[in-house]
Image: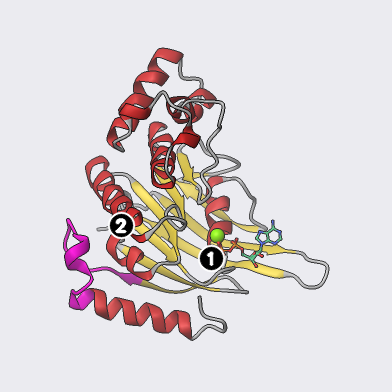
Amino acid sequence: MTEAPVLSIRGISRTFVGQERDVVALDNVDLDVQKGEFISLVGPSGCGKTTLLRIIDGLDAADSGTIDLEGKRLNGVSQDMAYVFQDINLLPWRSVRGNVELGLEARGVEKAERQRIATECLEMVGLKDVMNVPPYTLSGGMQQRVGVARALAVKPKVLLMDEPFGQLDNFTREALQAEVALLWEQLGITIVFVTHDVDESIFLSDRIVVMHRNPGRIVEILDVNLPRPRTQAEFRGEPETISLRSKITALLRSQEGGL
Ligand SMILES: Nc1ncnc2c1ncn2[C@@H]1O[C@H](COP(=O)(O)OP(=O)(O)OP(=O)(O)O)[C@@H](O)[C@H]1O
Ligand SMILES: [Mg+2]
């Protein structure tokens, strides 16, 4: 018997009404995410990936449909989720640790405890040594790590990550992919990850959700049958990776305009 999903998305639709035309960002999207799962959303620009994450997080409201977290209907912003944005936007007047404390502050955690948790999370992403510096003195990769630490600090039931490594160079991106995979394994958290990068989705995921644009729909959900832990050096040449890569690429190419 399979366990009840941690996140249950049912019939989510969202249309943005424009002056010239309406955009159906999401059309009747259903998705179940299992506890501890790493699931990726892949699809062309404008297929509704960010819209779906924002609706899951309660930052935007759907026109119709429901989101249940552990069987409870969500309504508005949920304290049980954390969001890592593509554009990390750290507060320049706060130290690195001060930025990691933000979500804890919003949840009313007292100062000493906030500092303890923030320090622990910065240690997890290898940034304990720079916790007192202003964030703008860090490289792009380090700033993304701060974003990951900030999200982990609130111990989310579901971690939502929206193209978190999209702006990084290949080398830094691979290093962060490996770190996120390790943290996910160690902490046993559930992650919904958005990416344009097909190989990134294969490396990280248990399942890959391929989406279609206008109307934004799920085209196919693919299982990734690769053993873990995976290594960057090995996974690319695996027959499973090659087969998934060609399936996903074909699904994306068949859409007008491709990626
Ligand atoms: N606030 C908004 N007002 C109007 N249209 C919007 C708004 N937010 C999103 N859209 C439109 O909805 C569609 C889906 O947008 P969304 O940002 O979810 O796509 P995406 O899959 O995340 O794309 P990308 O890969 O480029 O980030 C797009 O056509 C976008 O222009
Ligand atoms: Mg987006």
Bin the neighbour count of mark 2 within 10 Å (Cα to Cα): few under 14, some 14-19, many 20 and up. some
Secondary structure under tag 2 reads helix
The location of residue 105, given as percent across then percent down, is 51, 23
Residue type at mark 1: give it. Val
For the point 32% across and 44% down, the residue is 189
- Residue on which disc 1 sits: 29
Asked if the stretch drawn in magenta spans residue 227, the answer is yes
When the figure is inspected, residue 166 is found, relative to residue 160, above or below; the finding is below
Residue type at mark 2: give it. Glu
Asked if the stretch drawn in magenta spans residue 197, the answer is no
Instruction: Name the mark on residue 174.
Output: 2
Residue 101 visible in the displayed image? yes
Q: Quadrant of the N terminus?
A: bottom left
Instruction: Name the mark on residue 212.
Output: none
Region rendered in magenta? 222-240
For the point 72% across and 63% down, the residue is 16
Where in the image, quadrant-wise, is ligand 2 located?
A: bottom right
In the image, 3: left or right of 193? left
Q: How is the image coloured?
A: secondary structure
For the point 64% across and 59% down, the residue is 64
Secondary structure under tag 1 reads strand
For the point 53% across and 46% down, the residue is 57
When the figure is inspected, residue 129 is found, relative to residue 126, above or below; the finding is above
